[in-house]
Image: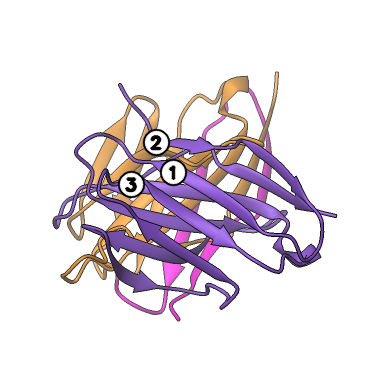
Amino acid sequence: AAGVIQSPRHLIKEKRETATLKCYPIPRHDTVYWYQQGPGQDPQFLISFYEKMQSDKGSIPDRFSAQQFSDYHSELNMSSLELGDSALYFCASSETGPLTEAFFGQGTRLTVV
Amino acid sequence: GQQLNQSPQSMFIQEGEDVSMNCTSSSIFNTWLWYKQEPGEGPVLLIALYKAGELTSNGRLTAQFGITRKDSFLNISASIPSDVGIYFCAGQEGTGGTSYGKLTFGQGTILTVHP
């Protein structure tokens, strides 16, 4: 079965650079979520999109932005990177509805040096 | 925001033993999910619970949605070495609109299984 695809799997950036992470949801899933997981931490919700509109917002820094495109893939744009942004970034997708489950991608490991 | 308290933080067990972990919350969740995560990988959904009091099994895994909707437990029976990983509980508010997938995670339980 198709899963959530994230790219790239690994990314190394320098401080103050920008990074773009991509997420391709499971086919027919219309909702995408982004999570950030620091070392030894649990995933923290950043932002979500439904039908290309932002649907919910968590602890996402102002330096980060995201969008969902017409083909439902999503991109997380991160600017002015800081050392503390080093983390695993996960995308999850789901269908909208009361009994839906979020399925996670394999994540992008971002290292800021 | 809502927080989930997951315990224990870590477990070291012998192969064949049973394992139990739980999560509690001060707030109500409409859905509880249990995920397993291996190093450098994304969380993999193990069990989803939708109704208070619901008891669901998936192979050697059994999970229950607490009757108060503020807690859940996960049991693993007859553990095997491949059960090693970090287990997360997650609560989903799902009260309407498009917030169904927004999850609040517990701190995780690190499981080590000795052969």
Chain with colour purple in the figure: A
| Point 20% across, 54% down: residue | B50
Q: How crowded is mark 3: few (under 14 residues within 10 Å), some or many (20 or more)?
A: many
Q: Say which amino acid is labelled 2.
A: Val
Residue A60 shows up from this direction: yes
Q: In the image, what residue occupies the spot 16% across and 69% down? A: B97
- Tell which residue pokes out farthest to the top in this image: B115
Report how far apart the C-alphas of labels 2 and 3 lie in the structure: 7 Å
The residue closer to the viewer here, A89 or B72, is: A89
Which one is nearer the viewer's eye here, A64 or B111?
Answer: A64
Mark closer to the chain start, 1 or 2: 2
Residue assigned mark 2: A4
Q: Nearer the viewer, residue A55 or A94?
A: A55
| Picture layout, residue A112 above or below residue A64 | above
Label drawn at residue A23: 1
Q: Where is residue B54 in the image (x, y as percent from the top left)?
A: 20, 51
Callout 1 secondary element: strand
Question: Looking at the colours in the rendered structure, which chain would you say is drawn in orange?
Answer: B
Q: Does the magenta stretch include residue B20?
A: yes
Residue A33: in magenta span: no
Instruction: Choose the circle earlier in sequence order: 3 or 1.
Output: 1
The chain under label 1 reads A
Are the residues under badges 1 and 2 in a single subunit?
A: yes
Q: Can residue B7 be seen in this view?
A: no
Question: Dot 2, crowdedness within 10 Å: few (<14), some or many (≥20)?
Answer: many
Quadrant position of residue A54: bottom left
Magenta-tinted stretch: B1-28
Q: Do the residues labelled 3 and 1 touch (CB within 8 Å)?
A: yes
**Contact (Cβ within 8 Å) of mark 2 with mark 3:** yes
